[in-house]
Image (spheres, grey):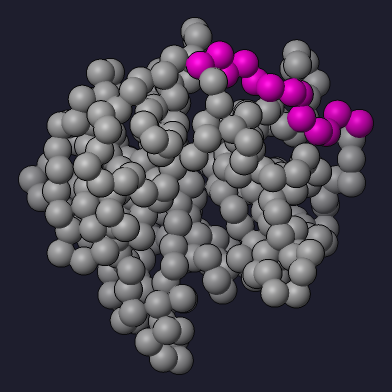
Amino acid sequence: MFLPLALFALMSSDVAAGNGFEGCAGRAGLGSGTVAHFGGSHASEESIYVLDASDPPSFLVIPKAGTPRRIGLPDPRRPLDRSGLGRAKDGSLCVLSSGGRMLLCFDPNSGVQTREQAFPSRMQGIWDVAGAMAYAAYDNESGRSLLTAEKASDTAALSPLHSRSGDNLLGRMQANLFSCGTGTADQTPCWFLEPAELMILSRDRPPLRMPVPALPGIAKQYPIRSLLLTEDILWLLVNDPPSQPALIAGEARRLVQWNRRANTVRSYSLPPRAKALIDANSRNALVLFRDGRAERCGDLRGVTP
């Protein structure tokens, strides 16, 4: 299923140059410290879990109500990858390790390791997709099921998302570099990295595919840094064009808010070195920066710095 290009072009023409409230509200009060090496996030009904893949690793837990806390993880025999975070059917939080060759799972309350599993091939990422933990392998073939999702009895392909084609082996591998953001209980925003293609995945209907917003000042290659979906709003953290010709993309300096119900798009300038989106509401998003701080950015009316 594709979003009509003409409709998206109309939506993209409604970009707000500024409304007097854009920007960031300063540190968002993560009292348990910063996130030095962001590895992924998971949002439950009660809390947001952020993987800090530092040495030693930990989860930063940000409750919807209450004070953030940090849960230390056991010093792993293998380094944790920074390629996403998923919640397994037993409630444990799982990450990739050893360059996508291993799955490690931890108790979300104590940090105790609960599972270790080897994969038959390397995985490029792990996420919560349409209500289930899912992972994607590096794929150099076209037309194959790209995502595998955990289910009650075994694993099952999350159909009908298939790997893309390319001119040769390297081209097919690059065409199928893939990532997902944070979504709702039944919908998840994902994207192919390059050529960039946005989609919203769900279990009961085909992927909703859409082009990247046609906004000025966005990198032509690898434009997307992070995605987050609420009920009506798709938030995008996008890269600037590179400052040097040798670079593929520049820093993430722009936050894009696409209201799917109202068919409007707004764009907000950000401070340098934005890294990921970890939470959002209908007006603003919680943005993690590379120095580990988190700031509430977007429409800041009523937000106290």
Give the x, y percent position of residue 4.
62, 67
Position of 136 with respect to 66 (left or right) is: left
Residue 229: image x %, image y %? 54, 41
Magenta includes 21? Answer: yes
The single residue placed furthest to the top in the displayed view is: 66
Q: Is residue 189 above or below residue 43?
A: below
**Quarter holding the C terminus?**
top right
Q: Is residue 65 left or right of residue 243?
A: left
Residue at 40 percent of width and 50 percent of height: 83
Instruction: Please tell me which residue is depicted at 65% across the width and 48% down the height of the picture.
Output: 237
| Depth check, front residue: 180 or 61 | 61
Which secondary structure dominates the residues rendered in magenta? Answer: loop
What segment is highlighted magenta in the picture? Answer: 20-32
| Residue 28 drawn in magenta | yes
| Residue 32 visible to an observer of this rendering | yes
221 and 117: which one is in front? 117
**Image quadrant where residue 125 sits:** bottom left
